[in-house]
Amino acid sequence: MDYVLHILVMMLIYSILSVSLDLAVGHTGLVSLAHASFYGVGAYASAILCGLMGFSFWVGISAGIVVAALMSVGLSIMSLRLSEDYFAIGTFSFGLVVSSVLTNWLSVTRGPFGIPGVPPPIIFGWTVRSQVGYLVAGATVLAMAVIVVRHFSSHQFGRVIHCIREDEVLAQSFGKNTLSFKVTVFALGACFAAVAGSLYAHYISFVDPTSFSINESILILSIVIVGGPASRFGPIIGAILLVGVPEVLRFAGLPFSVAADLRQILYGGVLVGIVLFRPQGIAGNYEFRR
Amino acid sequence: MSIGVQLVANGIVAGSAYSLLGISFGLIYSTARFFHFAYGGIYTAAAYAAYLTFVVLHLPFGLSLALAVTCAACLGVLCQTMVYQPLRRRGSGPASLLVASLGLFVVMQSVVSLGFGDATRVLRSGGLGSVAVFGALITPIQIAVIVTNLVMCAVVWLAVQFTRIGRATRAVADDVELSRIAGVNVERVIVIVFAVGSALAAVAAILASLDTDMRPTMGFEALLMGVVAAVIGGTGSIPGAFVGGMFLGLAQQIGVWRLPTAWQDAIAFCLLILCLIFRPQGVFGLPLRRTRI
């Protein structure tokens, strides 16, 4: 039962990540490979401030949000001069720099040793210890993410970012400052990724750089593409599938390294298959053809 | 003083390898117009194909080299014909192609790791003496690495400049529609570029695994250095990728003078980010076409 609950919590965390990334990837057409960096910044902020320095839960999570937002603004200003795949390469190298800093800045992040002993959070006087508590917290954040993404992808703001996705020059010709829209979209995604990171740090109570590597960014992007970019439930369905299905391999009695490789082959194969045969993803209706 | 000379020598060894990676990656990028991440998977596959034929099956070195290069070229052609070509025919843009090639990369790397395990493997047996050149210690293998890489870079540049297929490649890189109108078989040119680029990746992979050792993750590193060298130099420019690779190798090795070795990768990506911010077309590249109406 604990195991099932654990999988559910991880599905929730990945759903928060993919829903928040979808605002950039699906709705604005910006392929980002830096989402795990913001996730990592949130996790490390909580681990350092709450685990090592003894601050409260709210200090850790707010610091993570602020730092991730600032970093995302810096990153998206870089996109001013870049388009499409060059933007993906820019975010890719940004993700690599962040994971290199997490691994090598020993005096702050303790490098590959990671930071153990992140305490359980105390939210409004209620100490979250059980997995059910994390389920509730995760579901609340996910609901907020879904509402925020829904809000920003409809109304006037949503029409503008959809226009940027289809034809950025057209959006500019309507007098829209497309850069400020992109910055907003990116910062929103980064904030939710940081919250997901903070939840992860408290839940696992240990962080190390391998959880926030570039592979993690590729996984989050795959979840969005496989589930269905710019669709209502696509990213959540993607997270349930890509987090849940590989767990089945665990019961096949394979050695750990073989199972890990098979899981990677599954991710990669599914990603290629979806892009080739179903560009709108499993649950989507918008064909991703950037 | 001698530390400086040694670092420059290391920089040239690394830089010549990066130049070849940058040139082959840039060749594919400039013709196919997307970031072919599976390049890294092909690189790994080539190194392990050489390992399988040379160390496990005890074939002669020349034969195993030829087999590994052929295997890489076939993988490159398969990626293009099975995945990229159908995608492009359906009108997918560079970002979808990039996502698909990420998937291919993950599959290739994991298949190698499944087949050979994660442990480090060595291609050559026994140690090698080193010789002193201008006060820097270099192994004979490293000299071979520098010479082969330089020769390969020169051959590719000459081929692209002066042969018929080279001209067709430049035409496709410049404008796909115009070259199609002029009677160039674009699909064929792209397939050939994938075959040649992947074969060059195989050469680079085998040289690197002779110099040091091999791991299933080696392709990722090579891919990154290829991307950085190609982008710094200016994609589509062969001299640019050459200079970019050399510069990257020297910058990394000289950076080690002041910073711990672990920061080498960070140096490379910071260079890339700076380049993307201030000169996205690279040192030798033409301005990027940002949009097309």
Image (cartoon, coloured by chain):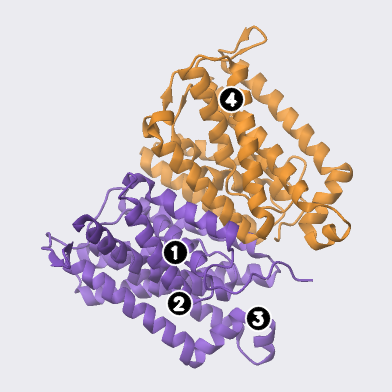
Q: Which residue is mark 3?
A: B176
Q: Quadrant of the N terminus of chain A?
A: top right
Check disc 1 and give the amino acid type. Answer: Gly
Check disc 4 and give the amino acid type. Answer: Leu
Image coordinates of residue B193 in percent, x first then y, are: 50, 78
Q: Residue at x 62, y 60 (%)?
A: A85
Circles 4 and 1 on the same chain: no
Per the model, the C-alpha gap separating discs 3 and 2 is 22 Å
Q: Position of B20 compared to A157: left or right?
A: left
- Labels 2, 1: front one: 2
Tell me the purple chain: B
Q: Which residue is mark 1?
A: B226
Farthest front residue?
B1
Image coordinates of residue A117 in percent, x first then y, are: 44, 18
Q: Position of A104 compared to A30: left or right?
A: left
Circles 2 and 1 on the same chain: yes
Q: Residue at x 69, y 51 (%)?
A: A281
Residues under numbered marks 4 and 1 in contact, where contact means CB atoms less than 8 Å apart: no
